[in-house]
Image (tube, rainbow, N blue to C red):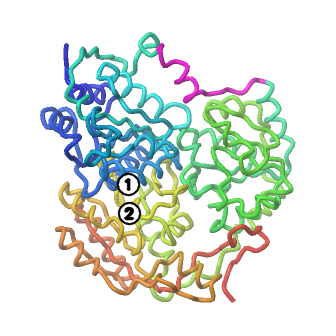
Amino acid sequence: MKYTGARIVIECLLEQGVDTVFGYPGGAILNIYDELYKNSSRLRHILTAHEQGASHAADGYARSTGKVGVVMATSGPGATNLVTGIATAYMDSVPIVAITCNVTTSQLGKDSFQEVDITGVTMPVTKHNFIVRDVAKLADTIREAFLIARTGRPGPVLVDIPKDITSAQCEYVPVVSGISSETQLAARKENLRRIIKIDEPGDREIKNAAELINAAQRPVIYAGGGIIISDACAELKALAERANIPVAMSLMGKASFPNRHPLALGMIGMHGTKASNMAADKSDLLIAIGTRFSDRVIGDPKKFAHHAKVLQIDIDPAEVNKNIKASTALIGNIKDVLDRLLPQITVKQPSAWNRQIDEWKAEVPPSWTKKEQLAPRFLYEYVNSKVGDDAIITTEVGQHQMWAAQFYQFTQPRTFLTSGGLGTMGYGTGAAIGAQIGNPGRTVVHFAGDGSFRMNCNELATIGHYGLPIIIIVVDNGALGNVRMWQTLFYEKHYSQTTLDFGPDFVKLAEAYGIRGLRAKNEDEYKKAVDAALLSGKPAVIDALIDIDEMVLPMIPPGKPVEQLIMELK
């Protein structure tokens, strides 16, 4: 059967099991949007207020469901508005496919209206990208894009399609399995092998790693987001419990291990717990699983875990020895590697090392226990107590993000969505939309800083229009809190351009979009606002007012060793 390129795009998305796409139309992509109109009963489209919001929604959909998220945008500024969302997904290994449409092939390279070389722009922040100049290659290109996005270390893939390719016709042959056969992909086989190559360690490598773990007296697991991506949380828990190994988590790994578990140390790094940072510092074996040794974790690389051998387990060989030298590395799918490793691990009882860990866990900053005003810890713990472990929590980037990682007790994977690698202010509201669309029966709560929320509050239009029961809690200190905190600590209190004392009124803003707005200045008002929002089953914005000088502690100053950990300000 002969289809236009636009129809082929729709059919290929359905082949891949896609049920929802996020996007924003424009001139160059109108042929595809016309097909979306004709196929609205088969494929749902969510119209956001801005293309960046659409890209973050596709990201949140992917992180919360484990599926590939799909976003669409037109040429020029439509495509470039996706770049921040694509880069966010790239840094955190999130599988999304971005479909953009460009000017016609005859207009490419001529500075045509709304023309941008989006494949050139996104080359550094995609796992791979394509521009399709032949309609006969369109179907296989889309299939290949999904295969690349989801296979190995996941990541974003962009497919750019000139407008004339979407109107051109060719024979379309459906593929029931969802991806092309080896015969159909033969011409690109070598390219695919290079992009999605997956190694597996040999038996001797597994045995050596097991011996390293069994011999360790002070082991620590440093758990990253790769554990969640590979669905290896059960295997991580089994390893920790089998050998009584404490588990420190990166920001991206926060939901990989039950936070209430006796072996859980909390977050590691700049704003991590004293227990997690001291354990890494004093360990004799650091087992790093699915993590990239971010600078926000290691501080001074010469002094990070400097007493320890490092066993690194990761699917991507590029991560090994990139920031910290590994003594031993196992390259492969984390779930498969841990499955093979577990039978060779010796069962161990709690030791003096575990008792030392428990002593460090008891040491927390004095600010964690304060009660005056509306304390950050209370914001998160109260929500946690009301929504249960199945709720999905999203954040923006800043102090409120760190408090979520410190105080919210995550127990299930894919329940904490945050921008870790890129640190994207403006991420969370779009991500909450994607999470709610992908998980319609679950509670989604979005914690936002007042600075971050200004960057994406236009997406209240999307939430209101679709009636998404997302609860947004604005942790409102009237400042760019994280930057102000650094100005307090390192810049002699020179508060340059970080005070936000000029609106908007978030309650009135919510009401302007037909969403209930509430304000809380103390614990009692906050409880009533959260309870009312949950009871309504409708979207709500809660403006929670906290002190402008609240700090995120503990803190290790950037680039410094754990010895300089700040527990309280003198």
Instruction: Please indicate whether residue 312 sits to the left or right of residue 14 in the image.
Output: right
User: In percent of the image, x 77 and y 36: which residue is there?
Assistant: 345
- The residues tagged by marks 1 and 2 sit, at their Cα atoms, a distance apart of 9 Å
What range of the chain is rendered magenta?
186-203
Question: 48 or 409: nearer the eye?
Answer: 48
Q: Is residue 201 magenta?
A: yes
- Label 1 element class: helix
- The dot on residue 446 is 2
Contact? badges 1 and 2 (CB < 8 Å): yes
Q: Quadrant of residue 95?
A: top left
Q: Which mark is residue 177?
A: none
Q: Position of residue 191 (x, y in %)?
A: 53, 23
The residue most toward the top is 183
**Amino acid type at mark 2:** His
- Relative image position of residue 444 (x, y in whole percent): 35, 57
Instruction: Place residue 178 in its image quadrant.
Output: top left
